[in-house]
Amino acid sequence: MSRYWSTVVYDLDPYVPGEQPRDGAPIKLNTNENPYPPSPKAVAAIRAALEEDGARLARYPDPDGDRLKAAIARHYARHAITPRQVFVGNSSDEVLSVIFQALFRHEAPLLLPDITYGFYTVYCGLYGIAHAEIPLDATFAIRPEDYQGRPNGGIIFPNPNAPTGRALALADIERIARANPDSVVTVDEAYVDFGAETAIALTGSHPNLLVTQTFSKSRALAGLRVGFAVGHPDLIEGLERVKNCFNSYPLDHLAIIGASAAMDDTDWFERNRRAVMESRDSLADALIGLGFQVIPSKANFVFVHHPRRDAAKLARHLRDRGIIVRHFNRARINQHLRITIGTPGECAALVDALSHILTEKENRS
């Protein structure tokens, strides 16, 4: 602590990101990164930009990211999305940060699930927004009826939810948006491409609905840091006003070029997400065979619990074998592990390690 800190800093409880090991090359299944390289077209576009005009990096990038907005609008043309309905930023975390500042009111609490992405409560603390945590049901599912008839300054939840992987149907999201016409309902779709339905389809008929996505998961560009939001132009204008008050240039030139090329490469995108989903389903079956309870997932991870084994100890035993998974020491979920979907080889190594760990413990007992 420092006497120079502001009172805001004293009270913050910062988000703790997943471990990023720097020594050796363990099997890293803890931060929901894509196990495969990004679109070759994205890499080629970045390389070409450097070779053709490296001096361009001496100039500021496009503050509006119009090239990327156009690519996103093309991708969602089936939903009649235009660039005026798109906001882009330096990761979906930054996009969410702008949403918290621009669109969530302070007169009533923000509603969010009690088990969800940890950054939401961090932003509430940073921006002085009261919040109310709405409990998931006994199966870790969001109940739409819990978000109806409650005064609020906004609503936010991931779909699929994290860390559970459960997804809401579009009809349920529409129920929430319709029941809260005076509040902004934000759906964080970081994992939507792995089996859920995007609520972007609903933004044309619900001006209070905002959808965020990231290039870090299904497009394998976590290192590029690109995110976006889609919604009514009035919501987008509010985000742009806040963005231009603290960082007019959130995306660098190469990020705009690479993300635009990745968004246009639909063939790679479809192959990649199918491969991840197939590995997820195979891994879930294998874990069930080892006695784990696996929550049905529409994300690039599974959330699992072994009824006879302590989750923290399992995570430590896996770490000793060079495999990193995520354990959350929080109420209701401290006996669960969140396991990112790796390559088929990485998933097989995980299953083999767990099989040995469980067998060794059985033999000792």
Image (cartoon, grey):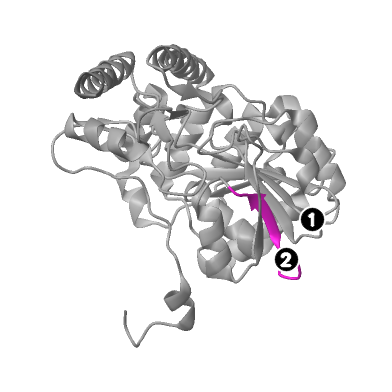
Which element is circle 2 on? loop
Which element is circle 1 on? loop
Find disc 1 in the rendering and name its residue. Answer: 183
Region in magenta:
105-114
Would you say residue 109 sits in the magenta stretch? Answer: yes
Q: Residue at x 38, y 27 (%)?
A: 308
- Residue at the extreme bottom of the image, as rendered: 3
Residue 284 lies, with reference to residue 32, above or below; the image says above
359 and 130: which one is in front? 359
32 and 357: which one is in front? 357
Relative image position of residue 265 (x, y in whole percent): 50, 22
Q: Most prominent secondary structure in the magenta stretch?
A: loop
- Residue at the extreme front of the image, as rendered: 365
300 and 214: which one is in front? 300
Q: Is residue 63 visible?
A: no
Answer with mark 1 or mark 2, whichever residue precedes in sequence: 2
Gap in angstroms between the C-alphas marked 1 and 2: 8 Å
Find disc 2 in the rendering and name its residue. Answer: 105
Relative image position of residue 333 (x, y in whole percent): 48, 41
Kindly indicate whether the residue at mark 2 contacts the one at mark 1 (C-beta within 8 angstroms).
yes
